[in-house]
Amino acid sequence: MKPRTVIIGDNFAEELAHQLNLEAILVEERIFFDGEIQPRLLQEKKAEQIILILQKKADQGINDYLIEYLLLARKAKDLAKKVLGIMPYLPYTRQDAIFEEGEPLSALYLAELIEQNLALFLTFNMHEHRKRIRDLFTIPAYNVSLFQDLAKQFQEFDPQQAIVLGPDREAKTFVDDFCSNFPAEKIIFLKQRNAKTGQITFSYPKLNLKDKDVIIVDDLVSTGGTILAVAKIVKQFQARSISFAFVHPVLGDQSFEALKVVHPKKIITTNTISNSYFELDLIEPLARFLKQELKI
Ligand code: R5P
């Protein structure tokens, strides 16, 4: 008899299958000398539905990750009527507008490709600046926030003595999610980027940070430029400590290490992209969401 649900993927598939008491089928990753990707399922099995999950590895090119995902989603479609796609980090979402004439609307075009073989899509804290997840996908699509779980890693802090700060207008939802589990004062900066030089500047309300523990939250950290610039402003206002909480370490360990320069009290991130420092394993909140919201 066909199993109802099978999970296909990498280490995440194995961990998720363990949490949900399901069967996992692992993928062998193979790359040819010319860069072509040929993943292989270690076992081929039909099922009622397949969950496909792959972690973006820090040393893997973002396009390789995408192609591998697309190939496996198409393969999964041959094995089950319904394929549920989980991409913990959804690439290309910063290209969610045509900034200069002639550019493709990459976030939308890639979502069109990704959803082709899927019945449902799930990601974490997609970079929702100019497009929401429902503007990109036509299938049911979920953008699950990890900020409430990130806040749990700050239990030793006194929320009365803390301030949760977002570096730009879009970070307001991250700050709100974080504070629903950590009732501290909230501050949102406004970020401006000079289109020619790339230089960023901030405007912000009157700040009273003296002797406060400031936690700067953001969806993704790449070079660290954005939250380090905010941290430097915070330092000038004599905060007692600075910490960082973010979901996607885009460059893996490098994103994390870039932040050490301001001697933060804590840096908390997740493993949506592989790195050796993460404190929040997304598998537990993911299993919770799949059980509670999708009844898997
Ligand atoms: C921007 O809107 C994002 O939320 C991040 O703040 C930004 O992309 C992070 O990049 P970086 O770490 O290179 O400043």
Image (spheres, helix red, strand yellow):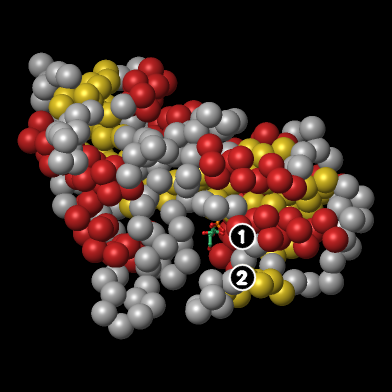
Query: Who's the residue at 23% across and 28% down the image?
Result: 29
**Residue 34 to residue 174: above or below:** above
Q: Mark 1 CB in 8 Å range of ligand 1? A: yes
Q: Secondary structure at mark 1?
A: helix
The residue pinned by badge 1 equals 226
Name the residue furthest front: 33
Residue occupying image coordinates x 85% and y 61%: 236
Asked whether 285 or 205 is in front, the reply is: 205
Do labels 1 and 2 touch, CB within 8 Å? Answer: yes
- Neighbour tally class for label 2: few under 14, some 14-19, many 20 plus, Cα within 10 Å: few
Of mark 1 and mark 2, the one earlier in the sequence is: 2
- Name the residue tied to disc 2: 200
Question: Residue 30 got which mark?
Answer: none
How many C-alpha atoms fall within 10 Å of the one at disc 1: few (<14), some, or many (≥20)?
A: some
Is ligand 1 less than 8 Å from the beta carbon at label 2? yes
Image coords of residue 103 (percent x, y):
28, 75
Amino acid at circle 2: Ile
Q: Quadrant of ligand 1?
A: bottom right
Q: Is residue 244 left or right of residue 143?
A: right
Query: What residue type is disc 1 on?
Result: Thr
Quadrant where the N terminus is found in the figure: top left
**Is residue 172 in sight in this rendering?**
no
- Count numbered badges in the picture: 2
Q: Position of residue 143 (x, y in %)?
A: 42, 51
**Residue 28 against residue 77 in the figure, above or below:** above
Report the residue that reaches farthest toward the bottom: 101
Q: Residue at x 21, y 45 (%)?
A: 67
> Disc 1 to disc 2, how far (Cα)?
8 Å
Q: Residue at x 37, y 27 (%)?
A: 12
